[in-house]
Amino acid sequence: MSALQTLAATSVEIKGNLGSIGYGLAAIGPGVGVGIIFGNGTQALARQPEAAGLIRANQILGFAFCEALALIGLVMPFVYPTS
């Protein structure tokens, strides 16, 4: 194996690893968002239990939007590969 082939193989390996690290860091945002949504929803339910239906519906909608961002972040590297 020549030095150029070794360098190319190392470059591909590093790009894959950086993509995994990048997605891991990008998943922090939706994770924090989900925590905020359910934390504030729990507080709202404790303050106004009679509005449980409306609060729960808004929680589910916010959760769906946060998780959609995480799934888009997971799929985009496959849609637009870098090389």
Image (cartoon, rainbow, N blue to C red):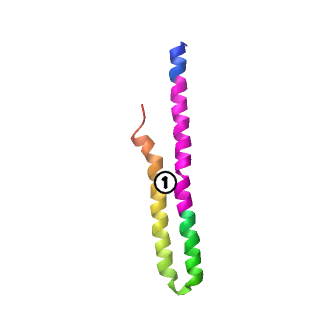
Say if the magenta span includes residue 25: yes
**Which residue is situated farthest in the top direction here?**
2
Looking at the image, which residue is at 56% across and 36% down?
A: 17
Q: Position of residue 19 (x, y in %)?
A: 51, 39
Find out whether residue 27 is within the magenta segment: yes
In the visual, does 79 lie left or right of 41?
A: left
State which quarter of the image contains the C terminus. Answer: top left
Q: Is residue 39 left or right of residue 66?
A: right
Residue 38: percent from left, percent from top? 56, 69
Report crowding for label 1: few under 14, some 14 to 19, many 20 or more residues within 10 A (C-alpha).
Answer: some
Q: Quadrant of residue 49?
A: bottom right
Q: Which residue is mark 1?
A: 70
Where is residue 16 drawn, in percent x and y? Answer: 52, 35
Q: Main secondary structure of the magenta part?
A: helix
Q: Amino acid at mark 1?
A: Ala
Q: Which residues are magenta?
A: 9-33
For image coordinates 59% across by 77% down, the residue present is 43
The vertical placement of 42 against 23, above or below, is below
Q: Is residue 31 left or right of residue 77?
A: right
38 up-or-down from 4: above or below:
below
